[in-house]
Amino acid sequence: PRYGVGTWLPEFEWAHYLPWQPWRGLIDRFAHHVVVTGNALPATGLAQLGLPAMNWVATSYLGDRVDRFRAKPLGRRVFDGIFNRPICQRMERFVLEHTHVLALSDFTARDLRAVAPAANLAGVLRMPIEMTADRPRQAPRRSPLVIGFAGRLSDPRKNMTLLLAAFRALRGGIDAQLHLVGDLTADWALHNGAADLLDDIRFLPARAPAEMAAFDDALDVVLIPSRQEGLGIVGWVANWKPIEILLYDWLPLTRRRNLYRRLAKAKVELKSY
């Protein structure tokens, strides 16, 4: 079964996860709990109730929100810094110490350990790779070159304005189309001054995983502009071989590891077929 639980006070993020009704009634219906989440906070209720839970975490609390809140109005940022973020950070440490935590990557594990040195880290569970659903073409199309990306595109971390700028530059010399699966529409392109590109951009609605194979099969190039989520989408990217994959600057990797610093600054060549 699937359940949806909302909140009346979205500005008080810490209040979302406390074990009051209706969360408490839902929790009591199940003997075992696995939390698959961005940051650790959704497991707060389980930790406070002392229930055993496996918490698969992709990022630290601050890492999950730094780009989103950088764009918020000043008043919202001040309110968040006084009434919300400090409480959430204390809750994060508590949850990391009182649930069994699996990190999505080695980087995530180090980040969580820095947040809570006593974190109950059980290990690293990387993004599973579905090797049977997607069957990319063995040869790309001749023309137009089809470039694609999929995700929660309105999330600032996806860095979609960079993708738009790259596509604009590309169209100066190559016949190409941009296919985007997610929650953006043509209004977004108009708002970002890209009315002249609309004839060559396809905004496609989100689709089920089983439907992604058809989308993948239509692509020649996967262009990933995300500044923070390179590791989180590695499993998806791996399904696209031998399609060309271009990755723009990976924020946490360039900050922490020399190997990925060199990768972020490496010259890339866009191949046309």
Image (tube, helix red, strand yellow):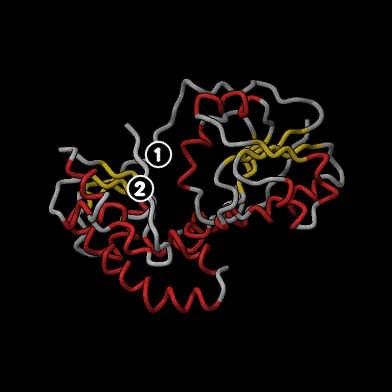
Answer with the quarter of the image where residue 148 lies.
top right
Q: Secondary structure at mark 1?
A: loop
One can see residue 262 in this view: no
User: Going by the image, does 164 lie left or right of 105?
Assistant: right
Residue 175 or 203: which is nearer the viewer?
203
- In the image, residue 246 sits, relative to residue 239, either above or below, namely below
User: Going by the image, does 212 lie left or right of 130?
Assistant: right
Three-letter amino acid code of the residue under disc 1: Met
So how many labels did they put on this image? 2
Mark 1, residue position: 127
Residue 52 or 138: which is nearer the viewer?
52
- In the image, residue 96 sits, relative to residue 185, either above or below, namely below
**How far from the left and from the top, in percent, is residue 137?**
64, 21
Mark 2, residue position: 5
Q: Quadrant of the N terminus?
A: top left
**How far from the left and from the top, in percent, is residue 119?**
22, 59
Dot 2 surroundings within 10 Å: few (below 14), some, or many (20 or more)?
A: few
